Image: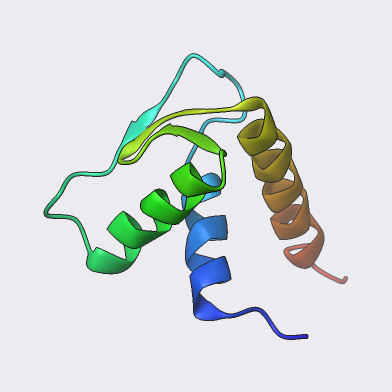
C-alpha cells in the first residue's frame, strides 16, 4: 500500500522535532502552509503531539518520530 500525501506530510512534521531533546517543541503558525497546519491537527488528534498547532511530542509521538527518523536514515544510505 503506497503512502498517501497526508501520511507523508505527517512524517515530515514528525521529523522536524529534535531527536536530541524532548524539551524542544515546535509551533505551527496559523499562516503556515495549509498542509502543515492540517498535518499538525491530524497528529494532535492521533495523540502524537500535545497541541493542535505543535507543542511537544507525546510518548506515542516520540516513538513515531524515532521510527520516521530511522526510515529516513535507511533510505538515505548511499551505496558505494
Left or right of 80 on screen, residue 1: left
* Color style of the picture: rainbow
Rendered residue at 57%/58% (across/down): 11
Q: Specify the farthest residue to the right.
A: 80
Locate residue 19, reporting x and y percent.
61, 30
Q: Quadrant of residue 63?
A: top right
Give 55 or 21, whichever is nearer the viewer: 55
Rendered residue at 41%/58% (across/down): 39
Left or right of 27 on screen, residue 13: right
Q: Quadrant of the C terminus?
A: bottom right
Locate residue 7, reporting x and y percent.
57, 68
Q: Specify the farthest residue to the bottom.
A: 1
Q: Specify the farthest residue to the left.
A: 31
Give 20 or 34, whichever is nearer the viewer: 34
Locate residue 51, reporting x and y percent.
37, 32
Give 47 or 76, whichever is nearer the viewer: 47
Left or right of 63 on screen, residue 8: left
Rendered residue at 69%/52% (across/down): 68
Number of marks in picture: 0
Q: Quadrant of the N terminus?
A: bottom right
Compared with 35, 61 (above or below) is: above
Q: Specify the farthest residue to the front.
A: 45
Compared with 39, 2 (above or below) is: below
Rendered residue at 49%/14% (across/down): 23
Give 79 or 51, whichever is nearer the viewer: 51
Amino acid at each position: 500500500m503506497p503512502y498517501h500525501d497526508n501520511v507523508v506530510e505527517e512524517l515530515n512534521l514528525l521529523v522536524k522535532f529534535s531527536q536530541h531533546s524532548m524539551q524542544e517543541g515546535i509551533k505551527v503558525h496559523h499562516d503556515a502552509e495549509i498542509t502543515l497546519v492540517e498535518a499538525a491537527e491530524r497528529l494532535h488528534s492521533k495523540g502524537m503531539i500535545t497541541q493542535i498547532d505543535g507543542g511537544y511530542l507525546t510518548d506515542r509521538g516520540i516513538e513515531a518520530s524515532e521510527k520516521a527518523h530511522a526510515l529516513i536514515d535507511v533510505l538515505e544510505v548511499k551505496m558505494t
